[in-house]
Amino acid sequence: HEYLHMFLGALKVMNFDTYNKVIGMVSNTEYFNTMKQLMSNNFRYSNLADSDLNEEVFVKILSKHLTKETDSSIDKSLHNAASLIERTLFPKSDLGSNVL
C-alpha cells in the first residue's frame, strides 16, 4: 500500500497529466465512489483535500486489486490504470510487464 503512494508520487512529479488520468480511470466508478464515501467518514481521512482523498481511495482499491480482493466490476479499470503507471514510470524496463 505505502509503496503505491511512492509510485503515484513519482508519477505526479514526472507527469501530472498522466497522474490525473490514472486517478480518473477509476474515480468515475461506483466502487470508487462507495469506497470514497466510506473513507471520508473515517477520522483518518475526513480532513483531507479531495485530491488527497482520491489518491488514498485509489491506493486502497489498487492494493485490494493486487491481492484479488476487489469487486470484479472495477478490475479492468484498475488493470488499465496500473498498466499506465507502469508504462510511464518504467518505459524501457527489463522487468517485463506487470511490474505493478
Image: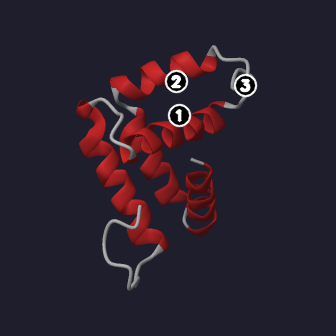
Which amino acid type is marked by label 2? Lys
Mark identifier at residue 33: none
Can you say whether 2 is above or below 34 in the image? below
Q: Residue at x 59, y 69 (%)?
A: 14
Which amino acid type is marked by label 3? Arg
Alpha-carbon span between mark 3 and mark 1: 12 Å
Mark identifier at residue 57: 1
**Which comes sooner in the sequence, label 3 or label 1?**
3
Given residues 54 and 71, the one toward you in this image is 71
Question: In the figure, is residue 60 to the left or right of 99?
Answer: right
The x and y percentages for residue 24 are 42, 42
**Which comes sooner in the sequence, label 2 or label 3?**
2
Q: Which residue is mark 2?
A: 36
Alpha-carbon span between mark 2 and mark 3: 13 Å
- Please tell me whether mark 1 sits on a helix, a strand or a loop: helix
Quadrant showing the C terminus: bottom left
Which amino acid type is marked by label 1? Val
The x and y percentages for residue 92 are 40, 85
Q: Residue at x 59, y 37 (%)?
A: 56
The x and y percentages for residue 48 are 72, 29
Question: In the figure, is residue 77 to the left or right of 7?
Answer: left
In which quarter of the view is residue 46 placed?
top right
Query: Is there a contact, CB below 8 Å, between mark 2 and mark 1?
Result: yes
Q: Which residue is mark 3?
A: 44
Question: In the figure, is residue 76 to the left or right of 42?
Answer: left
Given residues 13 and 36, the one toward you in this image is 36
- Please tell me whether mark 3 sits on a helix, a strand or a loop: loop
- Please tell me whether mark 2 sits on a helix, a strand or a loop: helix
Q: Residue at x 43, y 19 (%)?
A: 34
Can you say whether 50 is above or below 66 in the image? above
The x and y percentages for residue 10 are 61, 64
Q: Residue at x 56, y 60 (%)?
A: 7
